[in-house]
Image (cartoon, rainbow, N blue to C red):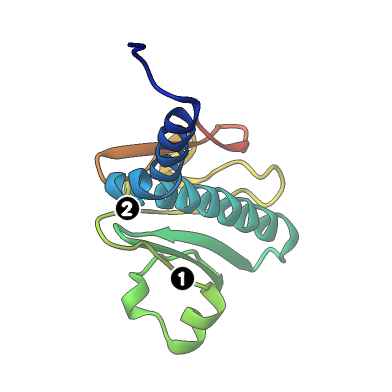
Amino acid sequence: MRRGFTLIELVIVILLLGILAAFAVPKWLGKGGFEIHTLRDELVARLRLVQTMNMNEGADRCTQLVLEANRFAHLTQVGICSASPIANWTTNQRERGRPVQASGTIVLSPETSLSFDKRSGRPLGTCTAGCELTVSGGGESVQLRIEAEGYIHALP
């Protein structure tokens, strides 16, 4: 009597494992990993937008990114940059600032407002020497860095 699996049994087992790997396992693990990476990439893109806007707008205007625990948006003001919570913005400011809301348990830190120098694109305020921002949720966290020279990038 021969022992072992037939070719058909092996193919069926491999096929079932493939289906589980593609559909069932990601649902068990949750979607936090994908969301935090996507949110980090969106945050990098928005920071680069704010940096570019600061470098191209007039001297009397100031654009900043307001980062709160579960959302972020950008705000352009005339005169001095003064951050206020997104909840206090006018309807027009909210529409123009395009707030991005993190879902569920995703947290952005630290809560701050960021702006950039008009000539060099270097960060101002609390991030002058460079800083790291963290997006965390579901037991995982990813970071991005704003270098002192103004380079904005995601950390591996």
From this viewpoint, which residue is outermost toward the bottom? Answer: 91
Residue 2, x across and y down, in percent: 36, 11
Q: Residue sitting at 55 percent across and 32 percent down?
A: 147
From this viewpoint, which residue is outermost toward the right? Answer: 56
From the viewer's side, name the closer residue of 107 and 32.
Answer: 32
Element type where label 2 sits in the image: loop
Is residue 100 positioned above or below 123 on the image? Answer: below
**Left or right: where does residue 115 sit relative to residue 57?**
left
Q: Residue sitting at 32 percent across and 77 percent down?
A: 87
Which of the 4 quarters of the picture holds residue 89? bottom left
The Cα–Cα distance between marks 1 and 2, rounded to whole angstroms, is: 15 Å
Visible in this render: residue 43? Answer: yes
* Amino acid type, mark 2: Glu
How packed mark 1 is, by other alpha carbons closer than 10 Å (few <14, some 14-19, many 20 or more), is some
Element type where label 1 sits in the image: loop
* Mark before the other along the chain sequence, 1 or 2: 1
Q: Residue sitting at 41 percent across and 50 percent down?
A: 23
Label 1 sits on residue:
99
Residue 70, x across and y down, in percent: 31, 60
**Left or right: where does residue 144 sit relative to residue 76?**
left
How packed mark 2 is, by other alpha carbons closer than 10 Å (few <14, some 14-19, many 20 or more), is some
From the viewer's side, name the closer residue of 1 and 24.
Answer: 1
* Amino acid type, mark 1: Pro
Q: Nearer the viewer, mark 1 or mark 2?
A: 1
Visible in this render: residue 137? Answer: no
From the viewer's side, name the closer residue of 149 and 81.
Answer: 149
Label 2 sits on residue:
111
